[in-house]
Image: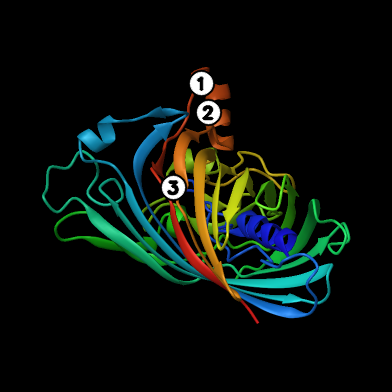
């Protein structure tokens, strides 16, 4: 029984707060919960997971260097992002399970540059744009590679699925250009509800138990988005610039996404404490398809503490990944401009200090 409990604890750590999202303008958005949340070896059951996620991004980075003057001058872009992720998993037998994840997302973006401009001294210069609705639904099949009834010390699970383009990737709102002029246009890529692409989900998870109380876990997630661009304008209701057209940033890209997690878990009766590293990223180049279109590539490396409490068929948990490294890397268009001018060009992006996940898992 103790082996089953520690397996359950570590598998929960594999999947706690496993939505793929970065903490800010690097637009890795929530796609629903990607986990089966099943204890290995259990036959035919249903598992329901509810996860609440929130972050506030406001610190701007170019590469790993923070642009502190943005906050000092009050020109920072602030994203408030909240998502409710609902995941239902069917365990068919001790090897196979199928999971569907449905995210509901709410975003508020506050900025000056999208409205009056960062140089404006008007008290009305800072304004908000918003988005709310269904995100991109995910459907994923999972299989344990080893017989869970025998592999008590460790196991590996593989996952393959689809991300469906169910989230609205053309959300529009009003942009206030001065005291009397408003224009309607698509909101920023970072608060769009979807990316407009049908993606291929790949996952690899595993755990190893040192004892009936402790063990290590790891998870790798990669979303392949073959579509290059979704055709949504980046001009926010204005006129597309010649520079944007020249360097292919006049429409939004449909980028790949990746995440890696690894850590150590310790269980004391029903309480579990875990700690590890979490890496989330948008690459500048995709595995399949082209790299044109506007994107803010980059990655976040976070320390991720997790606490969970299990009683009967319910598991309650909370995790707060705290950013250690925030890196806004060069995009495809940045590289084109650098090659042409001979001077390094690199855009910025806003990141959060931390991310909050609170949720519960129930097995039926």
Q: Earlier in the sequence, mark 3 or mark 1?
A: 3
- Tag count: 3
- Look at the numbered disc 2 and give the secondary structure of its residue: helix
Quadrant including the C terminus: bottom right
**Can see residue 167?**
no
Q: CA distance from mark 3 to mark 1?
A: 26 Å
Determine which of the numbered discs, if any, sits on residue 25 in the image. 3
Q: Which residue is found at the position 58% from the left and 63% from the top?
A: 31
Tags 1 and 2 touching, CB below 8 Å: yes
Quadrant including the N terminus: bottom right
Q: Which residue is found at the position 29% from the left and 45% from the top?
A: 113
Instruction: Between label 2 and label 3, give the one nearer the viewer.
Output: 3
The front one of 93 and 108 is: 93
- Look at the numbered disc 1 and give the secondary structure of its residue: helix
Q: Which residue is mark 1?
A: 341
Determine which of the numbered discs, if any, sits on residue 337 in the image. 2
Instruction: Between label 3 and label 1, give the one nearer the viewer.
Output: 3
The picture places residue 167, in percent across and down from the top left corner, at: 54, 69
Badge 3: residue crowd in 10 Å (few <14, some 14–19, many ≥20): many
Rendered view: 274 above or below 92: above
Residue farthest top in this picture:
342
């Amino acid at each position: 029984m103790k082996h089953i409990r520690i397996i359950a604890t570590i598998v929960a750590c594999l999947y706690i707060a496993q939505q793929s999202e970065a903490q800010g303008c690097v637009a890795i958005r929530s796609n629903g919960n990607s986990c089966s949340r099943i204890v290995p070896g259990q036959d035919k059951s249903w598992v329901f997971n509810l996860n609440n996620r929130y972050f506030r991004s406001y610190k701007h980075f170019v590469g790993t260097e923070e642009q502190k003057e943005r906050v000092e001058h009050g020109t920072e872009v602030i994203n408030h992002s909240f998502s409710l992720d609902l995941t239902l998993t069917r365990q068919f037998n001790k090897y196979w399970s199928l999971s569907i994840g449905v995210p509901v997302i709410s975003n508020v973006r506050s900025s000056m540059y999208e409205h009056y401009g960062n140089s404006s001294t008007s008290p009305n210069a800072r304004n908000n744009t918003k988005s709310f609705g269904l995100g991109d639904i995910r459907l994923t099949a999972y299989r344990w590679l080893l017989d869970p009834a025998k592999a008590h010390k460790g196991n590996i699970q593989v996952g393959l699925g689809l991300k469906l383009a169910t989230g609205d990737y053309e959300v529009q709102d009003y942009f206030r250009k001065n005291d009397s002029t408003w224009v309607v246009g698509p909101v920023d890529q970072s608060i769009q509800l979807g990316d407009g692409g049908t993606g291929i989900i790949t996952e690899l998870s595993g755990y190893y138990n040192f004892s009936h109380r402790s063990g290590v876990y790891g998870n790798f997630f990669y979303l392949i988005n073959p579509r290059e661009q979704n055709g949504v304008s980046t001009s926010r209701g204005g006129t597309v610039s010649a520079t944007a057209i020249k360097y292919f940033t006049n429409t939004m890209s449909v980028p790949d996404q990746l995440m890696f997690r690894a850590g150590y878990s310790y269980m004391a009766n029903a309480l579990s404490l875990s700690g590890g590293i979490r890496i989330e990223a948008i690459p500048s180049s995709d595995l399949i398809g082209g790299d044109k279109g506007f994107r803010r590539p980059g990655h976040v490396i976070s320390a991720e503490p997790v606490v969970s409490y299990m009683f009967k068929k319910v598991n309650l948990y909370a995790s707060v990944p705290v950013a250690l490294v925030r890196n806004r890397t060069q995009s495809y268009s940045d590289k084109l401009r650098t090659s042409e001018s001979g001077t390094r060009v690199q855009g910025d992006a806003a990141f959060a200090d931390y991310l909050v996940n609170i949720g519960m898992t129930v097995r039926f």
